[in-house]
Every structure is written in C-alpha cells, then in structure tokens.
Amino acid sequence: MADLFALEFVRNALLVSIVMGLLLSYLGVHVVGRGIVFVDLALGQISMLGVAVAAYFEQDPLVISIAFTLVGAFLMSFIKVHDKRLKVESIIGIVYAVSSAVTVLLISKAAHGDADIQEVLFGSIFTVTDNQIIAMAVVFGLLGVIHFIFRKQFFLITKKYETMDVEELSSFNLWNFLFYISIGLAIVLAVRAGGVIPVFAYLVVCPVSALLLTKGNTGVVLLSLLVGVIGSFLGIYFSVQFDFPAGASIVAMLGVLFAVASVIRLAKKSDSAA
C-alpha cells in the first residue's frame, strides 16, 4: 500500500479527494438538514450550462461556469416555500430540468461542447495539477474558516428550515446567502476535479451516515467529516488497486460506509428493543 501512494498522481488524487470530502461532507449536514439534497445536481447542471454557453461562444469554460453557478446559488438563496403542499426540492427540480434542456440545446450547436461537458460530469481526479489542488485548498479552507467562525448563525438558519419556520426570514438573509454562495463555489470547483456524482455523494452520503449513528450538531459534523476522509482513502485505493474509475470508486466506498452505518443503527435498535 505504501508503494501505491508513493506515486505522485495517486497522492494528488487522494489529497484533492480529502479536500473535497472535508468541506462537502460538512456542507452536506446543512443540505440534508434543509431538505435540499438535489441542490448539488441543480448547481452542477447550472455549471454545465455555463460550460455549454462558453463552448457556444468559444470562451473560457471555467470562468463562465463559475459565474453561472454563483448567480444560480445567489438566486436559490431567495427560494422560500410557504405552501405546505410544496417543497423546496420541487423548485430546485424545475431549475435542474430547465438548465438541462438549455444545456442540450446549446451543446447541439457547439463544436467542442461534448468534451467539456464530459469533464464536468465525470471529473479527472488523477490528472489534477498542483495549482488546482492549491487553489481548491485555499478556497475550501477559507470557506471552512468562515463556517467555523459563524457556525451558530448557519446552524440557526438550517434549524429554521428543518422546522419549516422560514416565515421569520426576510427575502434576503445574509447567512442564507453566504451558505448558497459557499456551496456554489464548493460545487463548481469540486465538480471540475471529481465530477457531479462523487460531489453529490459527499454532500449526501456522509451526513446521512453520520445522522444514522449520532445526534447533536458537533457529533454529526465530526462523524460526517470522518466518513468523507475514509471514503476518499478507500475509493482512491480501490480505484488504483483494481483499475476502476476514481469517481465511481469513491461513490462505491461511501456506499459501503453508509451500509455499515445502517447495520450499526439496526443493531442498536435491536439491542434497545431487547
């Protein structure tokens, strides 16, 4: 195993996966708590729409996709559903569907759009450069510091969404806005390296696994981070050892960890019932 991780491209892949896993697994605690688990797919699709627009007009896809994702995140921060018959997910689903349709329309007219979209969908963990890793680590580190310093404010907003007590929130709420901008930045950078599906898995599988095993914000966050790190390590090892795609391997390993958490939860219930 030591020889395996002596390879530079494997070390880089592991490092970028852990960086992604740490921030996304934390943000996922808020995503799951708010009941907006498809926000990743919607913002990922908006990112792809930006890539499609860039390909159509022959512009830099990274800059355009970041701009589109941040604008999408900003607009999503205003979404508040007061009608109990509707859910926030339904609005996010509409955004996802429309973004997908417009992306397909633009790609059909772009010369190199397919290649750029494939990169956004599946990422390229084993080809990340040192500059990409540094940039992601700096941005993710800053976001992590902001969320740590103002953790009470962020969790207070999430609690209001959990209890459907959003009437008190104004149309523009600073902490809600900062949350969506945070997740928008995290997604657009992480998707470039890891792809949409692994990012979605970090955001959802890690916190859900933690919620199965513990209660309380601190315990859930710490356990979610641990699942993200272990899943990253096992995923990269599994990918290199058995020659499987990296993104799919990470998702599969996170799935295994979720299954383990589910079994532990069932065992605890059985013991308490006995």
Image (cartoon, helix red, strand yellow):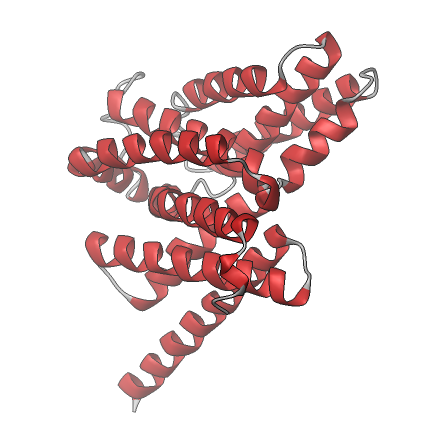
Outermost bottom residue:
274
Outermost top residue:
57
Residue 83 visible? The answer is no
x 50%, y 69%: residue: 1
Q: Quadrant of the C terminus?
A: bottom left
Give whichever of 1, 94 is nearer the camera. 1
Residue 211: image x %, image y %?
33, 60
Position of 237 with respect to 206 (left or right) is right
Identify whether 63 is placed above or below 253.
Answer: above
x 79%, y 21%: residue: 112
Q: Quadrant of residue 173?
A: top left
Residue 59: image x %, image y %?
66, 10
Residue 210: image x %, image y %?
34, 61
x 51%, y 15%: residue: 67
x 72%, y 10%: residue: 58
Residue 52: image x %, image y %?
70, 20
Identify whether 207 is placed above or below 173.
Answer: below
